[in-house]
Image (spheres, rainbow, N blue to C red):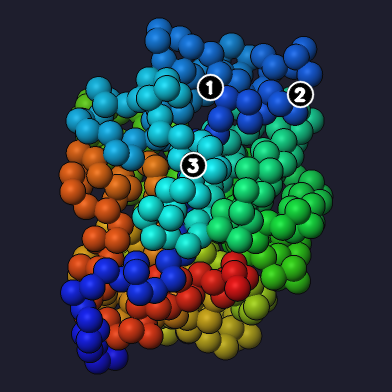
Amino acid sequence: MTLTAHPDADTDLFDRFRVIDVDTHLTEPPDTWTRSFPASLHDKVPHIERRDGRDTWVVNGEYVGAPGFYSMAGHDGVMPASIPQTYDDIAPAMYDARARLEFLDQEGIDAQILYPNVGGFGNGYFLRIGDRELVAQCVRAYNDFLTDWCSADPNRLIPITALPFWDIDLSLAEMDRGAALGHRAINFCNQPQDYGMPPLADRHWDPIWARAEEAGLAVNFHVGGGSMGTLLNDAAGMGWMTNFAKVSSMIFMDNMRCVADLIFGGICHRFPDLKLVSVESGAGWIPAALETFDWQWRNGGPRLEHPEYDLLPSEYFERQIYGCFWFEDRVAIDAIEKYPNNILFETDYPHPTCQYPGPQTPAQRPRDYASRVLASLPEEVTAKVLGGNAAGIYHLA
């Protein structure tokens, strides 16, 4: 592809193109779960307690997270000192739907796809609750909460179903229920083996892929969807924040493995109409990974063991897999140049690494970043990357 600059390359792209932000998180409000359970069960489901001056999520007396860690957009200073301590310190747009819509208008974003925090990016953290029936109820309660939250404007706040992947029958039922509620996709664990389940490439998961394909639901794999507990253990003594930065970088590679499983495991071949999205994993690595996959594919193994595979890995990817970017410069353009129909735009709002003003980007918003980095692209490509590709995946008119 020969890149030709926009005729108005110095203008704000968010004013000229539809923007669909495919990876954001909502900071779950304090009553996300307690509203669905009787008071006798409130201690057994995620609920907020104030400990040492900090609002924390607690289950059965055990700490399971803190909303401030998920809500860093716009906070100056360096973590952990700048982490918001209570909901009073967190911007309402992070947990209130009406405020989020006002924020979208302010930032020039048409719609956002919404991911969880407390239950884990791949839903596995729900298992910390213990009792499997109560866990199932908590997953359903979250999906119901998300439906209600997005009802403020379901064409702009886009819910995707948290899937209880550890139970196939329950997952299928929740997929059907979510689709009936208006959810546009499912959120699936990228490393189910971390929770004692078969690996992603195993045919154990075929009923999930078949149902998603039939229903037209994209399957989303968010980074950090596996168990990050051992990774976050700073055994080398680097320092908590240094290790956190390392882990936040290296979990991109977990999604490279995820994409490899989807292709080499035959999932793309068996389910050719299934849409698969690698979320918050960057895009710069995609061309290099696919060149590597193609090289190894041609060297014999898959062609001998699976003669039914009729496409190269890069061709399977181009047909049905998507990646997202939000901070990369030249490497994002390289990926877009190679796969203009497969790259999506995200912001990761309101997490610590998002583009909104903060310690790492004191004056830069997503619109500033996009207008600078994407200025060299043809208009039709910019339109796809900022919103057109996502509109097709998530059925947004």
Residue sitting nearer the eye, 140 or 254: 140
Q: Position of residue 339 (x, y in %)?
A: 38, 80
Q: Assess whether mark 1 and mark 3 are in contact (beta carbons under 8 angstroms).
A: no
In the image, 375 versus 316, the foreground residue is 375
Residue located 30% across and 57% down the image: 366
Pointer 2 residue: 37
Amino acid type at mark 2: Phe
Give the spatial CA distance, label 1 vs label 2.
16 Å
Q: Which residue is mark 3?
A: 99
| Quarter of the rendering occupied by the C terminus | bottom right
First in residue order: circle 3 vs circle 2: 2
Q: Amino acid at mark 3?
A: Ala
Q: Is residue 33 left or right of residue 180?
A: left
Question: Regarding mark 1 in the picture, which secondary structure is present there?
Answer: strand
For label 1, the residue is 57
Residue at coordinates 75% horizontally, 45% vertically from top-left? 167
